[in-house]
Structure formats: structure tokens, C-alpha cells
Image (cartoon, helix red, strand yellow):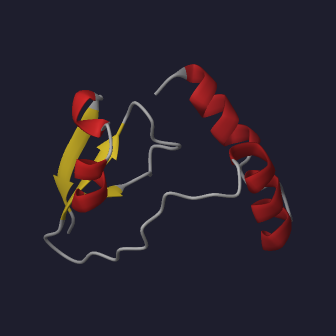
């Protein structure tokens, strides 16, 4: 993950006793209000991916379907099976 991505992520991490709605507003101001999150919930054994090229944090995960629809195949990624 590029250093600039880490700095942006750190800059929008919750601060002290920041209220959730304030944190969401600040994150939206930094990243934009639109999200590409599909909302899929996966369980044990589901294959998912972490895109090291465009992931917003080391915890970012992409479902298989979204991974295949995006440009991630040519990126630096990690495939894993959830436990």
C-alpha cells in the first residue's frame, strides 16, 4: 500500500471521543460520499480478496463477485478463505 494511502487512512481514523456521525462526515469529506461497498455478508469458507493496490486499509476486503467486476486482477492482491 502506498505511503500516501496510509497517511490518508490515518488522517481519517476516529479521533479521541469523536462521535460516530462526526467521523462518518469527516471520512466522507476526505473520500467522497459514494461507496463501492456491495454489502455482501460472507460466512465461514467464503473466498474473498484484499487488494493491496487500491485497498483503503489493511482490513479492506472485497467479495469474489466485486473482485471479478473490478480492475483488481492486475493489482497486487491476496486471496483468502474466511474462517
What residue lies at 53% left-to-right and 43% top-to-bottom?
56
Relative depth, front residue between 79 and 28? 28
How many numbered marks, from 0 up? Answer: 0
Relative depth, front residue between 20 and 28? 28
What residue lies at 34% left-to-right and 77% top-to-bottom?
41
The C terminus, quarter of image: bottom left
Against 50, residue 47 (above or below) is: below
Relative depth, front residue between 75 and 60? 75
Against 26, residue 3 (above or below) is: above
Q: Residue furthest top?
A: 3
Q: Quadrant of residue 43?
A: bottom left
Against 6, residue 25 (above or below) is: below
What residue lies at 67% left-to-right and 30% top-to-bottom?
7
Q: Would residue 7 be visible to someone looking at this image?
A: yes
Residue 24 locus on image (x, y percent): 75, 63
Q: Residue furthest front?
A: 69
Residue 79 locus on image (x, y percent): 19, 47
Q: Would residue 19 be visible to someone looking at this image?
A: no
Query: Is 45 left, or right, of 33 in this rendering?
Result: left
What residue lies at 35% left-to-right and 74% top-to-bottom?
40
Residue 39 locus on image (x, y percent): 43, 73
Query: Is 29 left, or right, of 44 in this rendering?
Result: right
Residue 3 locus on image (x, y percent): 57, 21
Query: Is 36 left, or right, of 53 in this rendering?
Result: right
Against 50, residue 76 (above or below) is: above
Relative depth, front residue between 80 and 63? 63
Amino acid at each position: 500500500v502506498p505511503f500516501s494511502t496510509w497517511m490518508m487512512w490515518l488522517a481519517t481514523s476516529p479521533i479521541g471521543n469523536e462521535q460516530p456521525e462526526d467521523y462518518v462526515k469527516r471520512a466522507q469529506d476526505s473520500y467522497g460520499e459514494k461507496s463501492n461497498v456491495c454489502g455482501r455478508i460472507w460466512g465461514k469458507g467464503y473466498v474473498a480478496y484484499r487488494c493491496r493496490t487500491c485497498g483503503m486499509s489493511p482490513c479492506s476486503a472485497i467479495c469474489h463477485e466485486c473482485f471479478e467486476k473490478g480492475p483488481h486482477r492486475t493489482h497486487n492482491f491476496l486471496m483468502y478463505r474466511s474462517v
